[in-house]
Image (cartoon, rainbow, N blue to C red):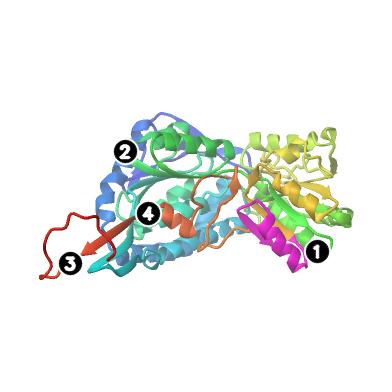
């Protein structure tokens, strides 16, 4: 059985631990690989390699850094299908979705290729007689990233390309459920010319996470995952004096007004709720139908949901693949089987799905719940699966109050033809990312991704300008080059005269 190992100091490393985790093919339910779990000593070795590389890498010219990143982007482009196959085999998402994940991750590589422009400082001349002031940004040192299973290539690429472009070195701890993509990204970076130790990958579980959070040489930590773990990451990182950005969970609402194109809204609700089997922190999990739109909209969504083709991700006919584990599939199904008892109407029940030839795979069908009470578990919890709840609201004001009462504030969307209503919504809604007739408003790479409330712990969003600021720190330099005729002693406080 193949073992996925660590990448430390520019080469594969088996590690010192005798602990391993299973890596399944979700479409078959079979364990096909195992992943080495890092010991504390393995994490220390990765941090030491990053620390050793930092002194030289932080001094490498911006021209050389960007040359490596341009080459990296070229190699990633050539290996898209290969990386997508790894993602499909271990995560289960369909091949086209895996390719889309890689494309969105490469946006941040492209942003990193332009780091020279982003790191330009500021200069004010003659702020006082013969005095100039400049502001510059410099790297932090060794930084770490802890990433989730649902985007095993994209989310790591949201982090390390910007971090290393800014002059930092990086230690990545990917999900142990689908570890191969991150390992391959590191191999390709070395092929592009990235020096040994600049990018390291340690596989593992909580042992590796906790060591990164407490290690004195790790100065900053980026995280994407669930809200409880994001809260834990922030607290532990701050306890150990680290800068932290921790992105948590979500319950994203899609508001549909009576004037909306309901066919278009139904199409987009299907795409946003069931794409990647709902295992997206930006998935639409609640549709808020306003006024008399509910019955018609639910009917259109149900019609489309029943027509979806569900099967293994490597089958070109499949529109949705399996969930990541058997345990997660069963948990997702429990929200549907328990919905009616909590007051919801089960319009489409996907819990009985069986895929011929893949009966042991981690498949669950799409489900649609209507008239879901806000007290129901299916509404209150982040399900992270292909379950869409519909909530009814009589007015826009009732709907916005409902959305804003959520403890999460990751993303949201409004579907309408009314520009005034859309403008009001984008100003009033309490969420970090807003779509207007766009169901999954994940920003492009040169803007920043991040939510509000319990969807973000820390001050900086990820990638874009926020990401660059997170991976750098500011320095202000005040300079005077005295004229030869200057001189004398003056003990008074410096003034602007």
Secondary structure at badge 1 equals: loop
Neighbor class of circle 4 (other Cα within 10 Å; few <14, some 14-19, many 20+) is some
Secondary structure at badge 2 equals: helix
Toward the viewer: 401 or 348? 401
Q: Left or right: where does residue 259 sit relative to residue 275?
A: right
| Residue carrying label 1 | 260
| Residue carrying label 3 | 481
Q: Which residues are magenta?
A: 415-437
Q: Are marks 4 and 3 in contact (CB under 8 Å)?
A: no
State the image coordinates of residue 405 (x, y, percent, origin top left). 71, 44
N-term mark: 3 or 2: 2
Q: Quadrant of residue 68?
A: bottom left
| Residue carrying label 4 | 472
| Residue carrying label 2 | 45
Residue 39 showing in the rendered view: yes
N-term mark: 1 or 2: 2
Please state, as top left, top right, bottom left or bottom right, where the C terminus lies in the image. Answer: bottom left
Secondary structure at badge 4 equals: strand
């Amino acid at each position: 059985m193949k073992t996925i190992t660590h990448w430390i100091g520019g080469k594969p490393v088996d590690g010192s631990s005798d602990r391993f985790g299973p890596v399944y093919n979700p479409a078959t339910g079979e364990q096909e690989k195992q992943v080495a779990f890092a010991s504390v000593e393995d994490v220390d070795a990765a941090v030491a390699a990053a620390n050793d590389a930092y002194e030289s890498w932080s001094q490498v010219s911006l021209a050389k850094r960007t040359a490596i990143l341009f080459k990296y982007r070229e190699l990633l482009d050539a290996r898209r299908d290969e990386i997508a196959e790894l993602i499909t085999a271990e995560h289960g998402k369909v091949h086209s979705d895996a390719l889309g994940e890689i494309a969105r991750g490469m946006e941040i590589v492209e942003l990193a290729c332009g780091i020279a422009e982003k790191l330009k400082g500021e200069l004010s001349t003659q702020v006082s007689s013969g005095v100039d002031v400049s502001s510059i940004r410099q790297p932090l040192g060794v930084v770490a990233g802890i990433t989730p299973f649902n985007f095993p290539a994209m989310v790591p690429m949201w982090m390390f390309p910007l971090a290393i472009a800014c002059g930092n070195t990086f230690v990545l701890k990917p999900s142990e459920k689908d570890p191969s993509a991150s390992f391959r990204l590191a191999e390709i970076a070395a092929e592009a010319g990235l020096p040994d130790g600049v990018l390291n990958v340690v596989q593992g579980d909580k042992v590796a996470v906790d060591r990164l959070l407490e290690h004195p040489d790790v100065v900053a930590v980026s995280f994407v995952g669930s809200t409880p773990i994001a809260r834990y990451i922030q607290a532990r990182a701050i306890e150990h004096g680290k800068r932290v950005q921790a992105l948590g969970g979500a319950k994203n609402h899609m508001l549909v007004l009576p004037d909306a194109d309901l066919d278009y809204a139904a199409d987009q609700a299907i795409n946003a709720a069931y794409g990647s089997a709902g295992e997206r922190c930006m998935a639409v999990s609640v549709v808020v139908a306003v006024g008399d739109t509910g019955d018609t909209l639910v009917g259109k969504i149900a019609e489309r949901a029943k027509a979806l083709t569900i099967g293994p991700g490597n089958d070109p006919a499949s529109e949705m693949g399996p969930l990541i584990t058997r345990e997660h599939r069963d948990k997702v199904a429990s929200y549907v089987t328990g919905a009616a008892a909590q007051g919801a109407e089960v319009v489409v029940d996907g819990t009985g799905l069986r895929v011929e030839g893949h009966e042991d795979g981690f498949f669950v069908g799409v489900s649609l719940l209507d008239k879901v009470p806000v007290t129901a578990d299916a509404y209150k919890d982040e399900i992270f699966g292909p379950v869409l709840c519909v909530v009814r609201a009589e007015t826009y004001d009732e709907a916005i109050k409902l959305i804003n009462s959520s403890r999460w504030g990751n993303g949201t969307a409004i579907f309408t033809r009314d520009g005034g209503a859309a403008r009001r919504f984008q100003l009033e809604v309490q969420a970090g990312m807003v779509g207007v007739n766009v169901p999954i408003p994940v920003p492009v790479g040169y803007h920043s991704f991040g939510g509000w409330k319990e969807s973000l712990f820390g001050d900086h969003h990820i990638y874009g300008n926020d990401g660059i600021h997170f991976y750098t720190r500011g320095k202000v330099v005040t300079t005077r080059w005295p004229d030869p005729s200057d001189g004398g002693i003056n003990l008074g406080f410096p003034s602007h005269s």
